[in-house]
Amino acid sequence: MKVYFNNSCKICKAEIDLYKKEKIEEIDWIDITNNKLAEEETSKDSKQLLRRLHVKDGEKILGGAAAFLLLWKKMPKYKFLYNFFKLPIIFNIFSLVYELIAFFLYIKNKKQLRN
């Protein structure tokens, strides 16, 4: 499984660094910052990759809240998050909140990448 994340975003990096500490061998962490290979592997452009977290598992590519569910499902320490946020009503709320936060981080980091 490959996780495509924005290492130039301080908040994103901090969260991913927590997950990396779990040392799950089947997860490859891919920084999307100026990464053409990530764009090719996901068939997403840099703006789409910057906009939200993506996970590639086999040939399936998930983004946003669904990507987090898959990531948490693979991590024993965070599986409780998967079990909670996969509940239909909770997932819908989580997806909405995630998209709002991701939008504001996208705007903030889009400015960072220009500098």
Image: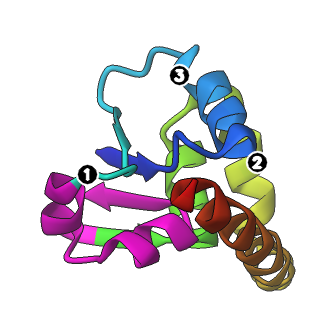
Judging from the image, what secondary structure is the residue with disc 2 in? helix
Quarter of the image with the N terminus in it: top left
Give the labeled residue for mark 1. Answer: 35
Q: Is residue 54 magenta?
A: yes
User: Closer to the N terminus: mark 2 or mark 1?
Assistant: 1
Judging from the image, what secondary structure is the residue with disc 1 in? loop
Judging from the image, what secondary structure is the residue with disc 3 in? helix
Amino acid type, mark 1: Asn
Graded by Cα atoms within 10 Å as few (under 14), some (14 to 19) or many (20 or more), the crowding at tag 3 reads some
* Mark identifier at residue 101: none
Amino acid type, mark 2: Leu
Give the labeled residue for mark 3. Answer: 20
Residue at the image position 70 percent from the left and 36 percent from the top: 15
Residue at the image position 39 percent from the left and 49 percent from the top: 33
* Mark identifier at residue 81: 2
The residue mark sitting in front, 2 or 1, is 1
The residue mark sitting in front, 3 or 1, is 1
User: Closer to the N terminus: mark 3 or mark 2?
Assistant: 3
Range covered by the magenta-colored residues: 36-60
User: Closer to the N terminus: mark 3 or mark 1?
Assistant: 3
Residue at the image position 76 percent from the left and 71 percent from the top: 98
